[in-house]
Image (spheres, rainbow, N blue to C red):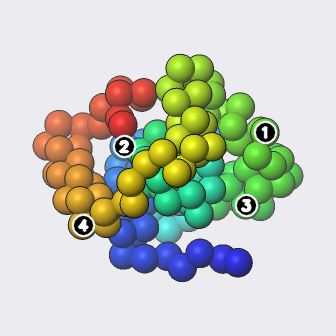
Amino acid sequence: MKLKRTALDALFSLVIRMIDKWTCQICHKQFGGYPAPGLEAAHCFSRSCQTIRFELDNAMAVCTWCHKFSPNSLHNQGNEYTRKLFRKRLGVKIFNELKWKYNNPSKFPKINRDEIKIFLLAEKERIEKSGPLILGARS
């Protein structure tokens, strides 16, 4: 079942694309900024897992071609390929922490969408003023 894309998902995608400087993290194609049609936020672990759905380390900006259509796309290559890319991107420690959160959702309280929205809006404003953080320091 396909998950409904909410306004919070759109804000999350915007922040991810800002963090990655409007650039596909696979083919390095640059997009001109908002709204950047053709540049998406790709999740490492399914966004159906609510505990990490809006975790900044769980997504990266990827063009539609690399995300869904290329023979080497994340969708065509599957979860192991995607996780290998994220492990390289984040480092083993942060990747393993993210994986643990994904595998242990019952250990976390129900997410508060209002708090997430406040955090994402603050992150968007911070990036607009100072630029993105270094990878692995985003959570």
| Residue at 36% across, 69% down | 8
Where 87 sits versus 121, above or below?
above
Q: Is residue 57 toward the left or the right of residue 63 in the image?
A: left
- Give yes or no for contact between labels 2 and 1 (Cβ–Cβ under 8 Å): no
Quadrant of the image containing the N terminus: bottom right
- Give yes or no for contact between labels 3 and 2 (Cβ–Cβ under 8 Å): no
Dot 4 crowding, Cα within 10 Å, few <14, some 14–19, many 20+ = few
Label located before the other in sequence (2 or 1): 2
The residue indicated by pointer 2 is 19
Q: Whole-percent x and y of residue 73?
A: 76, 51
Quadrant of the image containing the C terminus: top left
Q: Is residue 58 toward the left or the right of residue 26 in the image?
A: left
Where 6 sits versus 62, above or below?
below
Q: Nearer the viewer, residue 7 or 110?
A: 110
Mark 2 or 1, which is nearer the eye? Answer: 1
Q: Whole-percent x and y of residue 87?
A: 62, 28
